[in-house]
Structures are given as C-alpha cells and as structure tokens.
Image: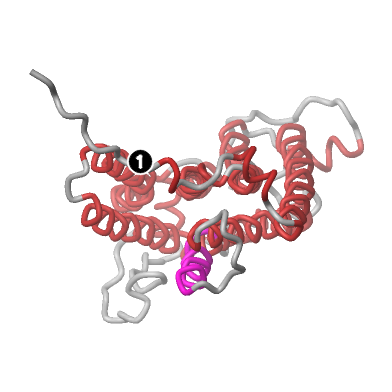
C-alpha cells in the first residue's frame, strides 16, 4: 500500500528571491535605495540610543520610564524591520506584521503613560469629573460624524473599558495571524479566511485608535506641558504610514505602476518601495521627536534642571510620586 505524496503548499520557484540572490541580481536603482535606507536606519538607531539615555537619566518615575522605553523603540523597530525586508524580500510580509503588531502595543503604552502621569484611573476620573468633562464618542476615526451619540461619564469602570478596547488590538492581531498560518497549512478556505481576517484586523485597529482618541481629547489640556499630545500624534502618524500608505503602494503595484524588474513580482515591488519610504519617514519622525519632546521642552524629564546644573546628584523625590 502506498500513500500519494500531497501537493506542495507552494512552489519554491514562484517565491520571491532569497536575500543573497536578490542582492546579486538587483539593479543599481534598487541597490541605491537599500543603501539610503541603511543610512537612514543607522541614524534612527543612533537617535534611539540618545532617547533611551534621556529617559534613563532625566526621568525619576520608573513606570513612566518603562512606557517611554516602549514608545522610543517604535521608530528603530519599524525602521530595522523595514530595512531587513528590503534586504530579504521573502520576509517582507512577516516584517510588516511585526511592525503593525508593535504599533498596536505602542497604543497600549500611550494609554498606560496617560494613566501613570495621573497616577491611576481613579485620579483621571477625579480630574475629569472635577472639570465636569464627559468622554465624547463622536471622535475620529469612528463615529466622528455622529454628534447625536451621548457622552459617557469618566468613571474608573468606563476608563477600564476604554483601556481594554486598546489592549484587544495586539491580542486580536496575533490571534488572527495564527489563524492565517493554520488556514494556509490546511489549505481550507484560505482566501476567504484572509479577507475576513483583514476586515477584523482593520476593525480592531480602528477601535483601539478610537478609544485612545476619546480619552486623550478630554485630558490633553492637563498634559500639554508633558508633550503628551505630540507623543500620541507620532504613534498615530506612524499608524497612517504603515496602513494607508501600504494600501496606496499595493494599488500602484497591482496595476504595474513600478518598473519591470522581473526578479520581483508587483506585490513585492510595492512592499519594497513601501519599506523604503517607511525607513525615511521613521528617520524624519525620530528627528522631530528628538526636537519636539526634548528634555528642554517636556515636563516628563523632571530631573533635567537638577541634573543639568548638578550632574550625578540623586533625585529629590520618590520615583513613585504622582506626576500630575
């Protein structure tokens, strides 16, 4: 009795080239783009080291430090992943998934940073109720045109619900990606599952962004001196670059808007130029963050004045004190 060998899941010859083959056969135009992206990525990593130093040396509150370490890692992680995808086309989709998942983690860190600046959800609730402010549902990216939506009271429970609306996003994305892998290996309804999964991923991401917007809009006046709104805009802008920009590049690639290099297919060309653009954008935003959220401009760096004039002195207050 013999068992027939099953059909291959995919044809190796139809896959994108390996990194070694790609670097050997890429033309000068693509190699120049890789070199430029490499330089931009090195610059991002150097600026990230500077950001980590500022966070470690000029901030006394350890939970806030932890949140900012995650946020400061956004630009280098996205830039390095995009650069690796340019060197190794076969891992482009995987690297893109890492970028998008980490971006969702950063939304959680933004919410946690807000909570840590106030001290707790109860402190946020007390401040908003003391200012007689309600949480508006009619904010982008969802319900922004639905002015009839009633506001909700900023109770600790409602704030916890908003937090879970943010936390669900990376969990949902990882779960859906696992389902994609299983469906691909089983080869059962894979195309339909991908479409449904992409819709769910988009809904999950929009829900997380919506929850962040709701709480940030009502509390941004209190946190203006900490450049909190600027930090959130960096994360939000990165999200636009990663999602909307990729959609545009995919459409251009689908209709053969890129050059006719035969070694890469239309989708892989779209991913390559999307990754190239991302490395430049991350370099630009890292430079802007270095300037706009510097110790001189943000109250987050509470030890800056003290350690600028008296280097090496210990902090004058406990790291567990509430900041706001």
Nearest the viewer among 193 and 224 is: 193
Q: Quadrant of residue 178?
A: top left
Q: Quadrant of residue 141?
A: bottom left
Q: Residue furthest top?
A: 1
Nearest the viewer among 11 and 288 is: 11
User: Residue 322: x and y, percent?
Assistant: 57, 39
Examine the rendering and report whether any part of residue 111 can be seen.
no
In this picture, residue 53 sits left or right of residue 254: right
User: Residue 88: x and y, percent?
Assistant: 59, 42
In this picture, residue 62 sits left or right of residue 114: right
Q: How is the image coloured?
A: secondary structure
Q: Is residue 280 above or below residue 295?
A: below
Give the residues in magenta.
242-255
User: Residue 27: x and y, percent?
Assistant: 71, 56
Give neighbour class at mark 1: few <14, some 14-19, many 20+ (Cα, 10 Å). some
Q: Is residue 257 above or below residue 126?
A: below
User: Residue 37: x and y, percent?
Assistant: 73, 52
Q: Main secondary structure of the magenta part?
A: helix
Does the magenta run of residues contain 34? no
Q: Is residue 151 above or below residue 171?
A: below
Nearest the viewer among 321 and 11 is: 11
SS category of the residue bearing label 1:
helix
Which residue is at a point 71% across and 38% down the rendered structure image? 55
On the image, numbered disc 1 is attached to which residue? 174
């Amino acid at each position: 009795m013999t068992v027939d060998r099953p059909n291959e899941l995919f044809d190796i010859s139809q896959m994108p080239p390996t990194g070694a083959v790609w670097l050997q056969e890429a033309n000068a135009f693509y190699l120049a783009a890789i070199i430029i992206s490499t330089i931009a990525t090195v610059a991002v990593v150097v600026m990230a080291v500077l950001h980590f130093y500022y966070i470690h040396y000029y901030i006394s509150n350890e939970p806030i430090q932890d949140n900012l370490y995650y946020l400061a890692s956004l630009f280098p992680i996205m830039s390095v992943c995009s650069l690796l995808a340019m060197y190794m086309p076969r891992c482009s989709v995987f690297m893109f998934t890492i970028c998008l998942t980490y971006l969702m983690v950063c939304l959680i860190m933004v919410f946690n940073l807000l909570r840590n600046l106030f001290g707790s959800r109860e402190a946020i609730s007390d401040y908003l109720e003391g200012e007689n402010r309600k949480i508006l549902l009619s904010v982008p990216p969802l319900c922004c045109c639905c002015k009839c939506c009633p506001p909700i009271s900023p109770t600790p429970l409602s704030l916890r619900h908003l937090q879970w609306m943010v936390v669900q996003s990376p969990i949902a994305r990882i779960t859906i990606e696992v389902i994609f892998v299983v469906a691909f290996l089983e080869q059962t309804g894979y195309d339909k599952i991908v479409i449904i999964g992409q819709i769910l991923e988009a809904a999950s991401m929009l829900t997380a962004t919506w929850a962040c917007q709701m709480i940030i809009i009502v509390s941004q006046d209190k946190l203006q001196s900490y450049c909190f709104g600027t930090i959130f805009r960096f994360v939000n802008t990165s999200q636009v670059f990663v999602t909307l920009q990729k959609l545009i590049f995919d459409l251009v690639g689908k209709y053969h808007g890129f050059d006719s290099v035969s070694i890469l297919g239309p989708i892989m060309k779209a991913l390559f130029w999307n990754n190239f653009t991302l490395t430049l954008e991350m370099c630009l935003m890292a430079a802007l963050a270095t300037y706009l959220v510097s110790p001189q401009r943000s109250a987050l760096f509470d030890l800056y004045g003290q350690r600028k004039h008296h280097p090496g002195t210990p902090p004058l207050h406990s790291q567990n004190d509430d900041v706001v």
